[in-house]
Amino acid sequence: MNLDEKTYEQFMEEALLKLPLYNKEWSDYSLSDPGITILEYLTAFTVLQQSKIYEKTEPIQEALLKLAGFVRKKGSCARVLLSAKNVTEKFVIPSGQQFLLGELVFETEQAMVISYGKITDILCVDEKGNLFDCTELTKEEPRFPVEIFTEKPSENMEIWFFMNDIPEQELIYYVKTESLYKRNSFVSEEESFFEKPDFAFLEWECYTRDGFVKIEVQDETQGFLFDGRITFFLENITPKMIKAYKRRGYIIRAVLKRADYDMPPRLGQITGFLFEVCQKKTGSIVKTVRKNKSLSIYSDILEEEYYKLYKKTGEFYQICSAKDYVVHRDGYGMYTFIFEEEQEEILLTAYTKEFMYAYELGTVYGYDNESIELPAKHIVEKDFSILAEQRKEHGSQYYLLYPEKTDKSGFLYQLEKEEGRIHILESGELTGCKLYLGGMAQSMGLEGNISAGKELLPAGYETGVKFINPAPAKGGCYEESMEELLLRYRQDIKTVHQAVCARDYERIVKNIPGLCIDKVKAYKKAEDNAVHVVVRPSMPKPEARLSKQYKRMIEFALDRHRLLGTAVILEQPVYLPVHVYGKIAVREQYTNAEKIIQHTIYKYLDYIHSERNFGEMLKFDEIFSAIEKLDCVVSIRNLSIKPAHLSLAALEGVDICPVPNCLLYPGDIRIETETMI
């Protein structure tokens, strides 16, 4: 028994039993005896002491879990793409522009130009110059999905995107797919244990005054296979409008350099000219500029006019008075602060009214485990900073301090984001200084992951422009709590990471990221003492087989997860037709009885499109019974089922037992009906 599991009563009982061994003259064990009173005090102290010795504090638990490879998942803000509709002319929105959806606040993280641009046409051009119009994808409600590379994608096919405008730096599209088959995503925690698919390679180009030039692209869709954004980086190029294929506009095109698709990409919609906003609510900002006479900023928060300027001198900042600089307001939220001379560094802090009243945080006293509460919780770490004021005879010195980073002052602190406090690890030379809020923003975690199709309203003004998100927001979450981390650890302990039984092999193959897997079966052959795994990919072709890429990726995954010394053999699926002949008496009123009977037989014979798996026995009596129960059937005069050949199946009486890697499917179905009057 551990000491921390013993109760006070158990400790007292043990002590009283040992008293005669130490002092035979002590015979009064009543509660009024002074010795017993002292013993009670000592026992209580022992219980408290042992509970502390065995206590696992949160930092200790976290350190132990880190040794096991488990660390807290960091919190992050949800991000969402917006499209602007009803735009008649270009306009600029500032950094920090807020967009509202109920209590949720989304913000831009940089100033952006909102354009009236749109995708006007999408064309697929094959090697022979044949055109396939895919413009349907640009509509708000497309009538039908489009196979953007046609039914047979081939190398050197091109997709031309025509646009009536084009931004100067960055262009974002969002692609929504409409695949007929479920494709495994790349979000699996075990993704690092798998090889990523490489079905296609697209080379992206933009037409400029020098012709088509290659451009840098970030493609989340993996060649139009997944929902996601495509970001085009257009810096240092000069797009030019041209006329081609009886259409006119700015052009970006994708050239299909490698086409090893398992199935043709099937799209539902493409939306262009998007911009990103982040779910957070900023209460204060910090901006710095080095080696300059001025600082320019475009942010809504400046309009509240709660701001302070500092200039750097050596290792610290000094606060500026209004006579040190001149302020120019160039428009809503557009401010420039100009000094007479070039400054080593200029620092600006700006606050909303709410945070200006709470920007003084407190004094650093320098004791152990010192914490200071902040005016908000669920804080965005990358936007957070504090200012420390150290008062000297010649004036105050200020230090800009970020979480878990130290400078020559020796000050070091941790930000407890979710609780809304800072934990001072080292006060250094700043003991006795005052702390002030620098930059800070709040997030609402998972609540920010809004679904697609919402209209967000711009804060601060009314407009006829509608801002709608064509895709769901992603990434919003709070930092993982200790309880959630422990739960994840316990679940991981129960999870089988190495393949031991057949179910493990099947689960691993079914969940390989990027693949479309229909059926899997793992089994053992006595003759070679190896694990055999047969896989059918999800493909339109009934007798689908594994491509070279599928085989490579599956073999890679199985090799990473198999037990040492276990041989694993990947097998191709084989298919066997089953022929049926029958004579059946049917009721007179059922004119379509033959079709009803054939449909029933098809359901039992079709292993490809049903839940039935490789090697499952086909039982004659189940088919016989199913036909016999049909309302249209009077009696079954004759019924026989047999495989097309016996190389892939064995007969066990009247039942058919296919080999372990075989799927059955309907062959020649001949049903003769006799109408009973």
Image: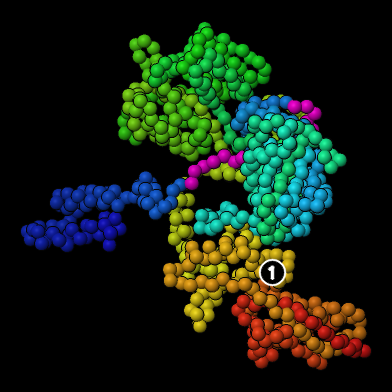
Instruction: Tell me, yes or no, whether the highlighted magenta stretch contains residue 592.
Output: no
Position of 34 with respect to 301 (left or right) is left
Q: Quadrant of the N terminus?
A: bottom left
> Residue 552 at what x, y percent from top left?
57, 63
Residue 80 shows in this picture? no
Q: Quadrant of residue 410?
A: top left
Reply above or below: 607 against 13. Answer: below
Badge 1 amino acid: Ala
Quick check: 401 left or right of 627?
left
Q: How is the image coloured?
A: rainbow
**How dense is the environment of label 1, judged by Cα within 10 Å: few (below 14), some, or many (20 and up)?**
some
| Kind of element beneath mark 1 | loop
Q: Residue 660, located in which quarter of the rendered image?
A: bottom right
The picture places residue 164, in percent across and down from the top left corner, at 79, 34
Query: Does residue 432 appear to the left or right of 421 in the view shown?
Result: left
Magenta segment boundaries in residue numbering: 73-90
- Res. 588 in view: yes
